[in-house]
Structures are given as C-alpha cells and as structure tokens.
Image (cartoon, coloured by chain):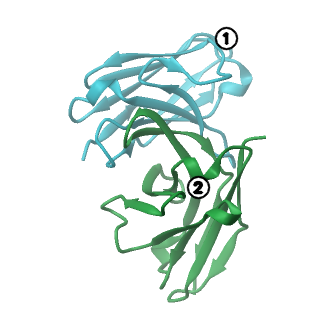
Chain colours: A green, B cyan
Amino acid sequence: EVQLVQSGAEVKKPGESLKISCKGSGYSFKTYWIGWVRQMPGKGLEWMGIIYPGDSDTRYSPSFQGQVTISVDKSISTTYLQWSSLQASDTAIYYCARPNGDSLFHWYFDLWGRGTLVTVSS
Amino acid sequence: EIVLTQSPGTLSLSPGERATLSCRASQSVTSNYLAWYQQKPGQAPRLLIYAASSRASGIPDRFSGSGSGTDFTLTISRLEPEDFAVYFCQQYGSSLTWTFGQGTKVEIK
C-alpha cells in the first residue's frame, strides 16, 4: 500500500526544539519529491517546502524560509520537519504530502499523511 | 503570490442536491493548474481534481471541475452523505509559490 506514515502528536513549550517525521512506503521514495503543509487551528492549508530524497535538494515557500528545516534520510525513506525554537504560533497540524504533476515545480499533492498535531504552550 | 478566494464560505444542502463551489484567483492561473481537495474532520485532505478538470484516481464521477483563467468551479452533481466536508482549491501555476483557498464547508441542511 502506498502511504505516508507520520510521527505522533507533540506538546512542547515555547523555545523548545522539535523534529517530526514522515515515512513513505509502497513506492520509490527516493524518486519522488515530498513536502510539508501546515494547517493552523480552524484554518486553511499552507505549503511549507519540499525536498528531493535522491539528492536532498530542498525548496522552501518564502513564508517559511528560515523558520523551519526540512531534511531527509533516504536510507529509511523518511523526511523530517524541524524547529530550533518553537513559538505558540507554530501550533498546528503538519501534513507531509507527495507532490505530483506534469511540469517541474508545478505540482499538486496526490498522497497525504494523516498529520502530526504540534501544540506549543507554556 | 496568487490569492485564492473560495465562495461561499458555507453551503447548506440536502443529500441528493447539486453543490457548486467557486474558487477565484487574484490573477490568471497558468495552464489552469488548479486542484481541488476534500477534507473531512480529523482526516488529511484528499485530492479530487487536478488541472482544473481531471479527476484523480478513484474519485467518483459525481465530482467535476471546470473553469479557466481566474474562475474555477467544483461541482458535486448529487450529494451523497459522505460528501459533507470542507473543500479547498490550490493553484500550482506559479512555480514553487503554491497557494490554497480558505475552504468551503458543505454542510447538511
């Protein structure tokens, strides 16, 4: 079965660091870009960035550049989203999702993980 | 950045009725690169439509997409109980500056 399996919910305090994960299976993980999408409570979706597991080429949305770090370990088909210092405004559900489409960097998302809820509260 | 505005915010309909959802872009979407997603409470979004009118794999034919340029529409021909959800549009015509609409909730009347 083609799927993305994400790590479990996290509760953190402001200023703490965090790394969440997403493991792909059932398809050739190394040959598909994979990305992260944020959904703040009761809000819409925001694309954060994508990474190519084959060579770790990473592209960020301008809104998230410098705010988070996306990485990958292709040996275990897993991508990561990392914060060095969380803020309350980082409270959201974070989805990993696989981009797809006919034209380079013109992509929709055809496969989604179930999401990781990150709660940042003092 | 292309801003997508979805309307209405909430659509109250009965099973069996037709649903028409709108997604308007602040500028023309290149190559009609527009997708629609369905999201149910506590679940991840599911791709319904891409390239404005192509149904994703496994999506029933009661879902259809249309439009071009700045105006796009998702139509659900006859609402089934499982179709009551939130629907988002996404433009991917701008390279690496993809954006989503704020969503339309389809609720049972």
Q: Residue at x 47, y 49 (%)?
A: A44
Image quarter where the N terminus of chain A lies is top right
Task: Choose mark 1 or mark 2, whichever is in front.
Answer: 2
Give how far across and how far down residue B90 sits, in percent. Answer: 42, 37
Q: Residue at x 58, y 55 (%)?
A: A96
Q: Amino acid at mark 1?
A: Gly
Position of residue B103 in the picture relative to residue B85 (left or right): left
Give how far across and how far down residue B97 sits, in percent. Answer: 31, 48
| Same chain, labels 1 and 2 | no
User: Label 1 marks which chain's residue?
Assistant: B
Give how far across and how far down residue A12 sits, in percent. Answer: 62, 82
Please name the residue that numbered disc 1 is placed on: B16
| Location of residue A80 with respect to A50 vertically, above or below | below
Q: Amino acid at mark 2?
A: Tyr
Q: How many marks?
A: 2
- Residue B27, quarter of the rendered image: top left
Tell me the tag on residue A95.
2
For disc 1, the neighbor class at 10 Å (few under 14, some 14 to 19, many from 20) is few
Give how far across and how far down residue B34 sits, in percent. Answer: 39, 29
Real-space Cα separation, disc 1 to disc 2, in angstroms:
32 Å
| Location of residue B31 with respect to A10 vertically, above or below | above
